[in-house]
């Protein structure tokens, strides 16, 4: 070999070594697989205690979906379409997978928490005690064995299909989860939609791409109950099942894994039908597609695993005589008393601790994925993302075991379902001690490590409040204005274009004492504080004054307020009366359309521009034009709206906070 040939060969060898090292650093062995777990026999469904008969049909199939990452000491996650997976099921699956080189610490078993899947052994045991037949119990046992076998097949299949892939992830947003705990006077009062309560709208998504650039796995996570379709006694995956289907439609060769975050007190909004569930799932898929098309973050490290078991503290359990007395109660409390007395008979005491598993996957310092057991409330996500670097943090719930709800200090203070009587279903002797929050949060922080602590100037995570609908509302208004309109609408739109130039935000100082206060949709569909009156009682009045705004137009003074009109299906009465400086000027009523009123003397004009509406209500802007300022003012103009009827729940509302100058400018742009 001559000198030139040797140099070329040496350079080629060095290049190949370098490229190999780069490839090794940017790819990791990944395998994915999924197996159908739809039952072929009648079986009781988990999630709703009121369903006492076995399922009546199938809406969508159920699946076990698995992903394995790594060659040596790989990690595996299997996600089951089910309401919850007990430690019994996790342990039995781990025993089977040990034969294939996976130990229990390397395995995560997660549930989508769909309430339309068969109940499994160990899940919420009190729900079924004393209410089932031997045949029903046998079929639950049979399905549990079946689903463990299928999860084994899914993981083993993923192990066998491993190939070099690149991993990348992104952090997006979904918005259909709403806090379901309705709070009245500081205490839980039922389920519904508490608009001002915390949420976690983060949507972390991990993508695995093969050597051809095809996406082969998509793993997404969102904090929300899978309860969109309600207590329908049929098999289905709810929104998470639809999310998987739509993601796999978007990424043709991919297996999708949908897991759930800290959504124990978060419910899908709206809910009630299969179509709504599919829309929620489609929203997840669309966001995943958007994230992949934009810049993602590459993961260069194979995940390392940290596992731990901690004891979560309960309040001191009641003594034997309490449980003996509870035997007389019947129902779920009777069954819990029997279980507690059995513990006393065997062990001589009832433990005041819950054995709780924790697991963390750390992709170096690039991403920490936390797996929490049970139904963890959203406060844990809010706090952990404040006390750690939220931009590199991913939190899962419903993983590895189902000890029940894991409440925060706030929820224990408010009481109610997640704090108290849900504990009965999970065979817990009582509520958690308030120290539970610090104990769990501190354990997670220790496991995640100092490299994930936040920067001193870290901005708050943007996912814990519902985003404003202002931008999309004004965009829809702009499109509506641009469409072909009726002659009257064109006239009013042109008039508004002139009025908005001179309109100033108007501070409404509420003066009446017969009105009511509430929170409701404003012009953008956001929930804001409002003052309102109904037509239930004649002469109910909402009175306010506002500082005089020097008119920029020589002949007219223009005031703009935000508020709304509602309950159009309620009986009609004479409506409402607008007065200015105690002079009666305009009669008007509930509408959802662009509307215009002029006083008989021509001195006062009002235009209502609705920008948000439901089937019966609307929210928007009231423009009130005064030809002249009355002489009896003292630097303020006083307005009032009074009910002219009774016996109807039709309402008029005024937002407590006036529209800002910036909002007025944006409105002007939308009207152009």
Image (cartoon, grey):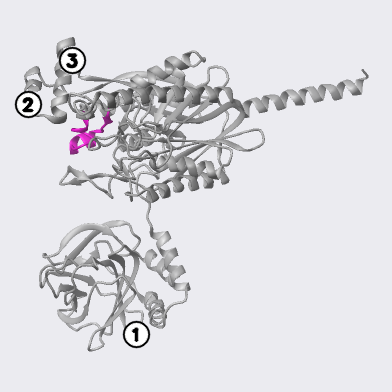
Label whose residue precedes the other's in the sequence (1 or 2): 2
Q: Secondary structure at mark 2?
A: loop
> Mark 2 — residue?
328
Quadrant position of residue 96: top left
Q: Position of residue 645 (x, y in %)?
A: 13, 74
Label whose residue precedes the other's in the sequence (3 or 1): 3
Quadrant position of residue 491: bottom left
Labels 3 & 1 near each other (Cβ < 8 A): no
* Rendered view: 193 above or below 28: below
> Mark 1 — residue?
554
Q: Position of residue 153 (x, y in %)?
A: 49, 23
97 part of magenta stretch:
no
Tell me the tag on residue 221. none
Work out whether residue 253 can be spotted.
yes
* Magenta extent: 404-423
Q: Residues within 10 Å of mark 2 (few under 14, many from 20)?
A: few
**Residue projecting furthest to the bottom:** 601
Q: Which residue is depicted at the point 17% across and 16% down?
A: 350
């Amino acid at each position: 070999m001559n000198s030139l040939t040797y140099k070329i060969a040496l350079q080629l060898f060095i290049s190949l070594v370098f490229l190999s090292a780069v490839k090794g650093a940017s790819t990791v062995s990944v395998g994915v697989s999924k197996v159908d777990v739809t039952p072929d026999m009648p079986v009781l469904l988990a999630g709703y205690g009121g369903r006492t008969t076995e399922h009546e049909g199938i809406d969508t199939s159920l699946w076990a979906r698995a992903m394995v990452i790594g060659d040596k000491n790989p990690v595996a996650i299997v996600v089951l379409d089910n309401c919850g997976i007990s430690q019994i099921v996790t342990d039995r699956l781990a025993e089977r997978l040990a034969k294939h080189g996976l130990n229990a610490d390397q395995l995560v078993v997660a549930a989508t928490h769909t309430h339309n899947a068969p109940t499994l052994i160990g899940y919420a045991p009190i729900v079924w005690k004393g209410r089932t037949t031997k045949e029903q119990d046998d079929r639950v046992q049979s399905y549990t064995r079946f689903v463990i076998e299928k999860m084994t097949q899914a993981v083993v299949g993923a192990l066998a299909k491993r190939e070099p892939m690149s991993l990348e992830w992104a952090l997006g947003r979904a918005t259909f989860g709403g806090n379901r705990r309705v709070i009245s006077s500081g205490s839980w009062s039922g389920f519904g939609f508490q608009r001002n309560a915390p949420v976690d709208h983060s949507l972390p998504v991990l993508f695995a791409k093969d050597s051809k650039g095809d996406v082969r796995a998509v793993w997404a996570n969102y904090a929300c109950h899978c309860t969109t379709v309600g207590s329908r006694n049929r098999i289905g995956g709810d929104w998470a099942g639809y999310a998987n289907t739509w993601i796999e439609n978007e990424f043709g060769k991919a297996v999708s894994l949908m897991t759930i975050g800290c959504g124990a007190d978060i419910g899908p909004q709206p809910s009630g039908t299969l179509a709504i569930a599919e829309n929620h799932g489609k929203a997840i898929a669309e966001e995943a597609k958007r994230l992949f098309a934009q810049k993602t973050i590459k993961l260069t490290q194979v995940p390392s695993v940290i596992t731990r078991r901690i004891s979560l503290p309960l309040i001191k359990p009641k003594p034997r005589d309490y449980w003996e007395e509870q035997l007389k109660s019947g129902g779920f409390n009777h069954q819990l008393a029997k279980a507690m007395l059995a513990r006393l008979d065997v062990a001589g005491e009832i433990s005041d601790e819950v054995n709780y598993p924790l697991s963390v996957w750390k992709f170096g310092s690039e991403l920490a994925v936390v797996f929490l057991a049970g139904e963890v409330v959203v406060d844990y996500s809010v706090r952990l993302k404040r006390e750690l670097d939220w931009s590199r943090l991913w939190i899962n719930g419903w993983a590895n075991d189902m000890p029940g709800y894991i409440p925060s200090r706030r929820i224990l203070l408010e009481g109610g379902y997640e704090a108290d009587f849900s504990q009965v279903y999970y065979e817990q002797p009582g509520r958690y001690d308030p120290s539970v929050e610090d104990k769990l949060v501190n354990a997670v922080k220790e496991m995640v490590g100092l490299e994930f602590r936040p920067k001193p100037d870290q901005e708050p995570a943007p996912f814990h409040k519902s985003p404003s609908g202002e931008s999309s509302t004004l965009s829809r208004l702009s499109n509506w204005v641009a469409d072909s309109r009726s002659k009257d609408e064109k006239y009013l739109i042109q008039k508004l274009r002139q009025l908005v130039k001179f309109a100033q935000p108007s501070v409404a100082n509420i003066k009446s004492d017969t009105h009511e206060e509430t929170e409701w949709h404003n012009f953008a569909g956001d929930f804001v504080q409002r003052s309102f009156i109904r037509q239930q009682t004649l002469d109910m009045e909402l009175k306010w004054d506002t500082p005089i705004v020097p008119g920029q137009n020589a002949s007219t003074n223009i005031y703009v307020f935000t508020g709304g009109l509602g309950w159009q299906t309620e009986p009609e009465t004479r409506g409402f009366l607008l007065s200015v400086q105690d002079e009666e000027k305009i009669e008007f009523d509930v509408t959802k359309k662009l509307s215009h009123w002029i006083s008989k003397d021509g001195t006062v004009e009002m235009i209502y521009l609705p920008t948000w509406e439901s089937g019966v209500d609307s929210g928007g802007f009231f423009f009130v034009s005064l030809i002249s300022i009355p002489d009896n003012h003292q630097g303020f103009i006083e307005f009032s709206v009074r009910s002219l009827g009774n016996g109807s729940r039709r309402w008029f509302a005024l937002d407590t906070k006036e529209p800002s100058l910036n909002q007025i400018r944006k409105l002007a742009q939308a009207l152009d």
